Image (cartoon, rainbow, N blue to C red):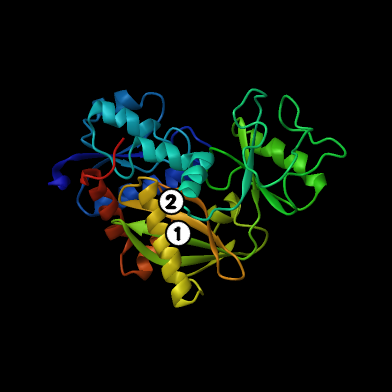
Amino acid sequence: MITVKRIGVLMGGMSSERNISLKTGGLAAASLIKKGYNVVAIDAGKDLPERLIDNGIEVAFIALHGRYGEDGCVQGLLEVMGIPYTGSGVSSSTICMDKLLTKKILEHHGISTPKFTVYSKSPQSLFNPPISPFHKGGLRGIKEAGMVLEEGDTPPMRYPFVVKPCREGSTIGVSIVSGKEGVSTALEDAFRYGDTVIIEEYIPGVEITAGIIDDKPLPLVEIVPSEGFYDYNTKTTDGMAEYIVPARLSHSITKDIQAIALETHRVLGCCYVSRVDFRVDPAGYPYVLEVNTIPGMTETSLLPRAAKEAGISYDELVEMILSSAFVKGVRS
């Protein structure tokens, strides 16, 4: 029985999403303890292997977000150590954390995602010049640091567009650029989080997220920020957004989005639980933005809201995610 096993809830870590991970992990650990599990909360630092051994961890509940936790690194470590863990395997985690890899796989499978182009700080990069045929020309003024747009250069697509780091989560480093004067600042911010940046078509409309649990879609959540867009501050602060469950979409569009979310979950090799984020344009056409293999589990998080609408309590949801450590799903 799982209840007799020593469970390590891995939280915190070394990414820019450390604070939200501590909240997710703390709540998940408290929930499991309440349900009678033998739980140890572990802040996942460089000494993680020693911590796992010293605490006799037999199962890992991964509550890490971002780099070193959601990108396949911890999953690979746990594979080597022979410790079962929750959620997706190494390859799926790596792919979903990398927005470029995700987009290329979505395109291959005919799943709609906003048009995009990619730039890198490295002049020898495979992704520089742009790999997308969405436009001609490019940001010729991107210098060696990749952050300067010179006078007269042509933007990669018409305004507004979105600038985002290729390998970051929780909308960290993301900007919506409305005019040329904002391009350099947006690039500079995005390049703080890695050497590759995606410049993406902005899709007007509504923000929708589709949770997946037990490889089945949950009710959709509509996100309405109080101002601006759904950035990190809005995501992690009470009262900064309204969450409407189920989303105010027609039955047919809802079913289409749930089907696309499940297909996305499958083609990216996700295991048991994920959350697929969408923009839905005014005509009701959905575009996949990205996939989260370790969705947040705080009081403002989206997966618990969707699960609640489906009749799944927070404690039940945590227990279901724990069970994914023993699902014979896709592993790398």
Establish if 83 lies above or below 246. Answer: above
Q: How far apart are marks 1 and 2 (CA)?
A: 7 Å
What residue would you read off at disc 1?
302
From the viewer's perspective, tell me whether residue 35 is left or right of residue 162: left
From the viewer's perspective, tell me whether residue 212 is left or right of residue 80: right
Q: Does the rendering let one see residue 112?
A: yes
Secondary-structure class at tag 2: loop
Point 35% across, 35% down: residue: 90
Disc ID at residue 296: 2
Q: Determine contact: label 1, label 2, CB under 8 Å.
A: yes
Q: Residue 190 at what x, y percent from top left?
A: 65, 38
From the viewer's side, name the closer residue of 321 and 268: 268
Establish if 205 lies above or below 140. Answer: below
Point 41% across, 24% down: residue: 46
Considering the image in quadrants, where does the C terminus appear?
Answer: top left
Q: What type is the residue that disc 2 sits on?
A: Gly
Q: Earlier in the sequence, mark 1 or mark 2?
A: 2
Q: Residue 240 at what x, y percent from top left?
A: 59, 61
Q: Does the rendering let one see residue 11?
A: no
From the viewer's perspective, tell me whether residue 281 is left or right of residue 214: right
Q: Residue 71 at what x, y percent from top left?
A: 43, 36
Q: Give the total of numbered labels.
A: 2
